[in-house]
Amino acid sequence: MNEELESVNFIEQEPEETLSMNPRKFILWLFIVSIIMLFAAMTSAYLVRRAEGNWLEYDIPPIFGYSTAVLIVSSLTIHWAYWAAKKDRFNTLKTAITITFVAGMAFLYMQFQGWVQLVDQKVFFVGNPAGSFMYVFTGLHAFHLISGLIVLLFALKASFQLRVHAKSLDQIEIAATYWHFLDILWIYLFLFLIYFH
């Protein structure tokens, strides 16, 4: 009898709720952690190589500072998009994502102009490691920013299909998280390059 009661009690107990995360968010966070590790290793290598000497001195192109401001503004607009999604303001959502995308494209163009200014200073990818590191840092960040633009395009498409709204925020949360991360990563790189130039 006691065994039957115990088995009934066991069956009636509700299973404990397990902590779960959206698989796409989990993949995003794994990707972010891997990017952090990559840039941490590269900035460490930069410091070690710089300490060895034979380091080319040159001016960091001013346009990199302007592009940093553009990226900071784009962080505000993607947050605006997230706010609009939470309030079901669909036109504002589409506008904010579009502005963020345009700002991202402007940032890439400004980065390219920064490379042009580096070449004008006779700083090349091949040659002194100081120049090589600059191109690798900015180039890798630009590559990841392009992936961020693709994420934004998917979010924009979903917003036009009304799949982003107050009860379905995953897509815009992923886009906003990744975009904010890319902005923070660039600010870190820019300050690092200025300080350890």
Image (tube, rainbow, N blue to C red):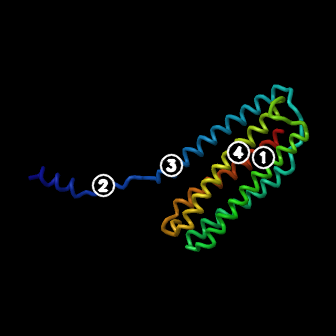
- The reply to whether dot 1 and dot 2 touch (C-beta < 8 Å) is no
Residue at screen point 84% across, 35% down: 124
Q: Nearer the viewer, residue 20 or 110?
A: 110
Residue 160 drawn above or below residue 184: below
x and y percentages locating residue 53 in the rendered image: 85, 26
Residue at screen point 65% across, 62% down: 78
Q: Nearer the viewer, residue 72 or 161?
A: 161
Disc 2 residue type? Pro
Which label belongs to residue 26? 3
- The reply to whether dot 4 and dot 1 touch (C-beta < 8 Å) is no
Residue at screen point 52% across, 47% down: 27
Q: CA distance from mark 4 to mark 1?
A: 11 Å
Q: CA distance from mark 3 to mark 4?
A: 21 Å
Disc 1 residue type? Phe
SS category of the residue bearing label 2 = loop
Q: Quadrant of the C terminus?
A: top right
Q: Which residue is mark 1?
A: 190
Disc 4 residue type? His
Q: Which residue is mark 2?
A: 15
Q: Which of pointers 3 and 2 lies earlier in the amino acid sequence?
A: 2
Disc 3 residue type? Phe
Residue 135 position by quadrant: top right
Label 3 crowding class (10 Å Cα cut-off): few <14, some 14-19, many 20+? few
Q: CA distance from mark 2 to mark 4?
A: 45 Å
- The reply to whether dot 3 and dot 2 touch (C-beta < 8 Å) is no
Q: Which residue is mark 4?
A: 141
